[in-house]
Image: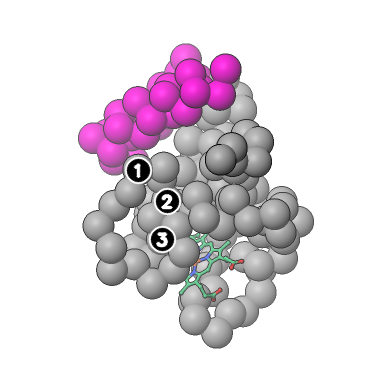
Amino acid sequence: MTTTVSHRIGALVLAGLSMAAASPPASASPEEDHRIRGWTVAVQLCSRCHVIGKEPQDGGRVGPAFTTIAAMPSTTGLALNVFLQSHHQWMPSVRLDRDEMDAVIDYILSLKPPEPAKP
Ligand code: HEC
């Protein structure tokens, strides 16, 4: 179930915070591993300007929250690929290797709401 997964990711995220750059727990599945890697990249390179997790954080960030980005119908893997490889007016270009980029894209897409929000 999605909620279980996000709770697990939440727990791992907390673990990751305290372990800083340590490698992710060995028990994670390859998919989860990849997302955790993406999250790690996001913490290091994107969290300065974006709220990268599901929890609201203090304001003052210049970029839209990753959950907001993920919820936009226009956000697809392809769109993110293009965005991250192009130059933007407000967001500085980020230099990621192929794998980091895939991981961070995977992470952002994992924040997509499972289905359209119910009223
Ligand atoms: C120095 C601040 C800064 C950093 C660092 C930064 N961003 Fe951004 N980002 C912005 C701003 C500001 C915007 C909104 C304006 C724009 O689209 O250029 C934005 C927009 C975006 C969007 C597009 C949302 C849309 O409207 O389509 C994505 C995706 C994104 N950022 C991903 C990332 C990722 C992934 C990283 C880390 C690898 C990152 N950003 C790092 C400031 C930043």
Q: Looking at the picture, how far across and down is residue 59, in whole percent?
A: 28, 63
> What secondary structure is found at the residue carrying circle 3?
loop
> What secondary structure is found at the residue carrying circle 2?
loop
Residue corresponding to mark 1? 55
Task: Please give the range of residues in magenta.
Answer: 1-28
Whether residue 82 is situated above or below residue 47 in the rendered picture = below
Most common secondary structure along the magenta stretch: helix
Residue corresponding to mark 2? 52
Image quadrant holding the C terminus, namely: top right
Whether residue 9 is situated above or below residue 94 in the rendered picture = above
Residue contact at pointers 2 and 3, CB within 8 angstroms: yes
Residue contact at pointers 3 and 1, CB within 8 angstroms: no
Q: In which quarter of the image is residue 40?
A: top left
> What secondary structure is found at the residue carrying circle 1?
loop
Please report the residue visible at 29 percent of the width from the left and 52 percent of the height from the top.
57
Between the C-alphas of marks 2 and 3, the distance is: 6 Å
**On residue 42, which mark appears?**
none
Between the C-alphas of marks 3 and 1, the distance is: 12 Å
Residue corresponding to mark 3? 50
Is 62 part of what is drawn in magenta? no
Q: What residue type is labelled 1?
A: Glu
